[in-house]
Image (cartoon, grey):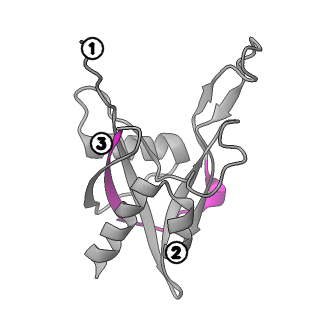
């Protein structure tokens, strides 16, 4: 019998307060698979926790790698959610106002088109944007929207 281990990820949900209310910074995955996907495809900036790495340290590292943004905190723990694919995402929130137009992301390569033998590079995140609560509900990966709801409850 083979034991399957599900990956653990960590991320930071950046939020800001505006005259219209709370807004949440979400990231759109780069690459050809997500190019035309919008509703339910966005995510909080997150990534895999390395062996021996503290989850909050991983969350901050992944935020920097995927967006180029570094935030000082304080970091509000939002707990973890389990996605449909079995991956657990640990998250923290941080109030900050970063400019999504300044996004810089690390790149990955994948064979594209399939079976072509070509391995072009793509950004891990191709864009980031602030969204209000209802728009975030439509854009965000369904399991991760619970993190937004937890943050709103925490802020009262």
Q: Mark 2 points at which residue?
A: 134
Please name whichever residue, 37 or 55, is drawn nearer the observer in this view of the structure: 37
Q: In this view, does 87 lie to the left or right of 112?
A: left
Q: Circle 2 sits in a helix, a strand or a loop, which is it?
A: helix
Q: In this view, does 153 lie to the left or right of 129?
A: left
* Of labels 3 and 2, the one closer to you: 2
Q: Mark 1 to mark 2: distance in Å? A: 41 Å
* Residue that appears at 75% across and 15% down: 118
Q: Mark 3 to mark 2: distance in Å? A: 30 Å
* Residue that appears at 47% across and 49% down: 45
For the magenta stretch, what is the residue range?
87-103
- Residue 132 seen in render: no
Please determine whether, in this image, residue 75 is positioned above or below residue 80: below
Q: Quadrant of residue 94?
A: bottom left
- What is the x, y in percent for residue 111? 68, 19
Q: Outermost residue, bottom direction?
A: 19
Q: Mark 3 points at which residue?
A: 57
**Along the polypeptide, which appears first: circle 3 or circle 2?**
3
- What is the x, y in percent for residue 50? 32, 29
Q: Are marks 1 and 2 in contact (CB under 8 Å)?
A: no
* Residue that appears at 68% across and 27% down: 121
Q: In this view, does 123 lie to the left or right of 66?
A: right
Q: In which quarter of the image is the C terminus?
A: bottom left
- Crowd tier of the residue under label 3, counting other residues whose Cα lies within 10 Å: few below 14, some 14–19, many 20 or above: some
Please name whichever residue, 64 or 132, is drawn nearer the observer in this view of the structure: 132
**Along the polypeptide, which appears first: circle 1 or circle 2?**
1
Q: Quadrant of the N terminus?
A: top left
* Residue that appears at 39% across and 54% down: 12
In the rendered structure, find residue 2 and report the number of the disc placed on it.
1
Q: Mark 3 to mark 1: distance in Å? A: 31 Å
Q: In which quarter of the image is residue 131?
A: bottom right
């Amino acid at each position: 019998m083979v034991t399957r281990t599900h990956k653990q990820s960590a991320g930071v949900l950046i939020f800001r307060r505006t005259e219209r209310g709370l807004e949440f910074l979400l990231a759109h995955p780069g690459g050809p698979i997500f190019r035309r996907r919008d509703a339910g495809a966005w995510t909080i900036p997150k990534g895999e926790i390395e062996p021996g790495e503290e989850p909050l340290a991983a969350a901050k590292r992944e935020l920097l790698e995927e967006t180029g943004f570094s935030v000082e905190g304080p970091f509000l723990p939002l707990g973890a959610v389990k996605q449909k694919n079995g991956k657990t995402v640990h998250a923290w929130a941080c109030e900050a106002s970063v400019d999504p137009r300044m996004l810089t992301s690390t790149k990955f390569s994948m064979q594209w088109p399939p079976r072509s033998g070509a391995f072009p590079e793509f950004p891990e995140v191709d864009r980031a944007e602030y969204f209000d609560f209802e728009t975030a509900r439509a854009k965000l990966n369904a399991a991760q929207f619970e993190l937004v709801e937890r943050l709103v409850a925490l802020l009262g």
